[in-house]
Image: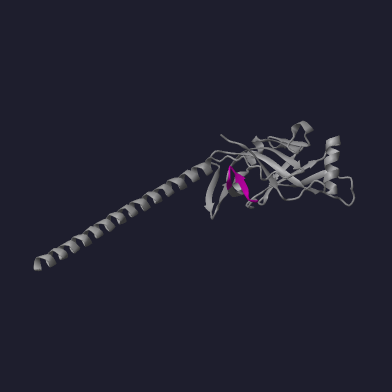
Amino acid sequence: MENKELRYNPINWRVVSDAENNDTRTIKGTAIVFNSRSELLNEQGIRFYETITPEAVTRELIEKSDIVMLYNHKKDAGVLARSKNGIGSLRINITDEGVDYEFEAKNTALGNEVLESVKRGDLDSCSFAFYVRDGGDKWAKEGSVYLRTINEISMLTDFSIVINPAYSATNCNSRGLDSLIETEAKAQRLIDAEALEVQRIQDIEAVELKESALEAYYLNLKNIVNSL
């Protein structure tokens, strides 16, 4: 089953400025960065880094998603902008570097508050919510941690201006990780079984060597007794 995941993008938001129009209400920036390793994450005690590949987000994905721009991922606070099936007030563009967004802050209490906070630098972080398709990620062991590579996102649900970044709130689709851990466990069990078998053979050889030495000792002792 796919789990909804939240990720923080450290790329700052930007308010577009125009020398002839200081009253611009356009906010734009980057929601997702491709091929950029995340901070160290944690899923049920498993530490891992994460990378999203360019193949994970396609135009087809944008055109089938209903993506809303929120404040702290709370729909009940109001929607700042929206892209439904690739069309709407939330404009989304996929580049070689990642997924860019752009929208005009509405002249509402929420829109004005967010716009002013962004201009002042009080708000400078973006988080995005998504689902990874089963089998859409790959896990690999890298030293004492794991590396997760996301190759296919099945749905984007929202971009959000956040006060406290939520990159560490993974709740990720861990089927791939579970499979890798089970494979590693099976390999370790085979190694342990082989080690036990080697030890068993060595113990048998050691016993046989001792028995052979004892037989030689008693035979020599018998020969000495017979010669007296």
Identify the residue at the far front of this view. 228
Q: Give the left or right position of residue 72, taking residue 190 as reference.
A: right
Quarter of the image where the N terminus is located: top right
Residue depicted at x 75% and y 37% = 70
Q: Nearer the viewer, residue 129 or 170?
A: 170
**Residue 46 in view, yes or no:** yes
Q: Quadrant of the C terminus?
A: bottom left
Residue lying furthest left: 227
Q: Position of residue 85 (x, y in %)?
A: 68, 35
Q: Is residue 69 magenta?
A: no
159 left or right, relative to 18? left
**Is residue 18 placed above or below 69 in the rendered structure?**
below
User: What color scheme is it?
Assistant: one colour
- The answer to whether residue 203 is above or below residue 3 is below
Please tell me whether residue 44 belongs to the stretch shown in magenta: yes
**Residue 5 at what x, y percent from top left?**
64, 39
Query: What range of the chain is rendered magenta?
Result: 39-46
Work out whether 121 lies above or below 132: below
In the displayed structure, does residue 66 sit left or right of residue 145? Answer: right
- Coordinates of residue 219 in the picture (x, y in percent): 15, 63
> 44 or 37: which is nearer to us?
44
Give the image quarter of residue 153. Answer: top right
The answer to whether residue 108 is seen in the rendering is no
